[in-house]
Image (spheres, rainbow, N blue to C red):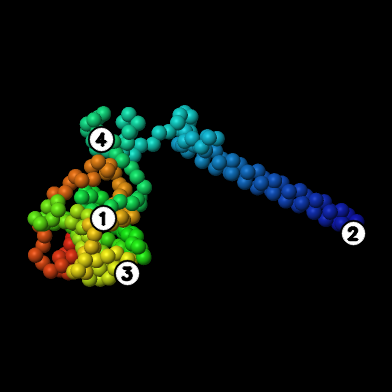
């Protein structure tokens, strides 16, 4: 009887082990099938693929994908504003680096100053790094071009009359520390030869031949004190 019981126990053990192997095999097959189906679904749901040359193609037709910009378009291999309705007569846009070097002058158009958020001015003994919070163009009958541009920086106002640069006392101290020569008033540079500035204003989409356009001011010079005028201008700019 003991032998018979031992034989039955061995038989049951073998059957249990075979059952375990069967269940394990089925689970593995199910797992592999699930992975295969998931991979297939992901592949067929793709609309775009990359070929070996990293060219973007349609997943099913294999055609090369051409991307378009909502702001620009190509006409005769020239980059033009998409909103231009002149066809072949649309002017080509000039694209330069984000930061470049130019002479700081009120002759620059408003589009250039709108892009100016910071600027670096190299002097004989130092470099000024100024943050520009806002700018304004005012009518000034005694100015070189009929208008002046005021840059509102974190060290005070910097006024441009053509290439002549004047400023408030705090900005004057900064210019003097950088080695610039000031006139007797200590509120403007002694030379009107122009200050070279590195910043966003020299870039953008305006070609050099058009940089003297758009100089008509939208406001007259404010009779308010400079501090109050600057505060109102900053509030209007943030709004």
Instruction: Give me the residue at 83% from left, 55% from top.
Output: 9
Label 1 crowd (10 A; few <14 / some 14-19 / many >=20): some
- 7 and 226: which is toward the camera: 226
Left or right placement of residue 148 versus residue 127 in this view: left
- Answer above or below: position of 191 versus 60: below
Instruction: For residue 134, say whether it is visible.
Output: no
Evaluate if marks 2 and 3 touch, with contact meaning CB atoms under 8 Å apart. no
How far across and how far down the image is residue 96, in percent?
A: 34, 45
Screen quadrant of the C terminus: bottom left
Label 4 crowd (10 A; few <14 / some 14-19 / many >=20): some
Evaluate if marks 2 and 4 touch, with contact meaning CB atoms under 8 Å apart. no
- Answer above or below: position of 165 versus 85: below
Q: Tell me the element at label 3.
A: helix
- Answer above or below: position of 194 versus 211: below
How far across and how far down the image is residue 181, in percent?
A: 27, 65
- Report the Cα–Cα distance between label 4 and label 1: 30 Å
- Report the mark closest to the observer, 4 or 3: 3
Q: Tell me the element at label 1.
A: loop
- Report the Cα–Cα distance between label 3 and label 1: 18 Å
Instruction: Tell me the residue that label 2 is attached to.
Output: 2
Instruction: Specify the label residue 12 is tagged with.
Output: none
- Report the mark closest to the observer, 1 or 2: 1
Left or right placement of residue 37 versus residue 149 in this view: right
Instruction: Tell me the residue that label 1 is attached to.
Output: 194
- Report the mark closest to the observer, 2 or 4: 4
Instruction: Tell me the residue that label 4 is attached to.
Output: 91
Instruction: Tell me the residue that label 3 is attached to.
Output: 177
Mark nearer the N terminus (2 vs 3): 2
């Amino acid at each position: 009887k003991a032998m018979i019981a031992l034989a039955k126990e061995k038989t049951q053990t073998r059957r249990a082990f075979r059952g375990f192997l069967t269940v394990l095999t089925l689970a593995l097959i199910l797992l592999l099938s699930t992975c295969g189906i998931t991979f297939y679904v992901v592949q067929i749901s793709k609309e775009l693929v990359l070929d070996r040359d990293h060219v973007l193609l349609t997943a099913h037709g294999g055609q090369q994908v051409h991307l378009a910009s909502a702001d620009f378009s190509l006409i005769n291999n020239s980059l033009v504003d998409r909103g231009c309705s002149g066809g072949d007569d649309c002017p080509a846009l000039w694209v330069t680096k984000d930061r470049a070097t130019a002479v700081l002058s009120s002759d620059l158009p408003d589009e250039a100053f709108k892009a100016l958020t910071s600027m670096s001015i190299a002097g004989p003994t130092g470099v000024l790094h100024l943050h520009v919070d806002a700018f304004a163009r005012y009518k000034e009958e005694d100015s070189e071009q009929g208008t002046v541009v005021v840059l509102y920086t974190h060290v005070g106002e910097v006024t441009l009359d053509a290439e002549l640069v004047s400023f408030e006392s705090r900005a004057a101290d900064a210019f003097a520390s950088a080695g610039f020569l000031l006139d007797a008033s200590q509120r403007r540079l002694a030379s009107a030869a122009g200050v070279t500035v590195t910043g966003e204003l020299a870039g953008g989409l305006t070609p050099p031949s058009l940089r003297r356009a758009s100089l008509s001011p939208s406001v007259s010079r404010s009779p308010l004190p400079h501090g109050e005028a600057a505060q109102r201008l900053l509030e209007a700019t943030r709004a």
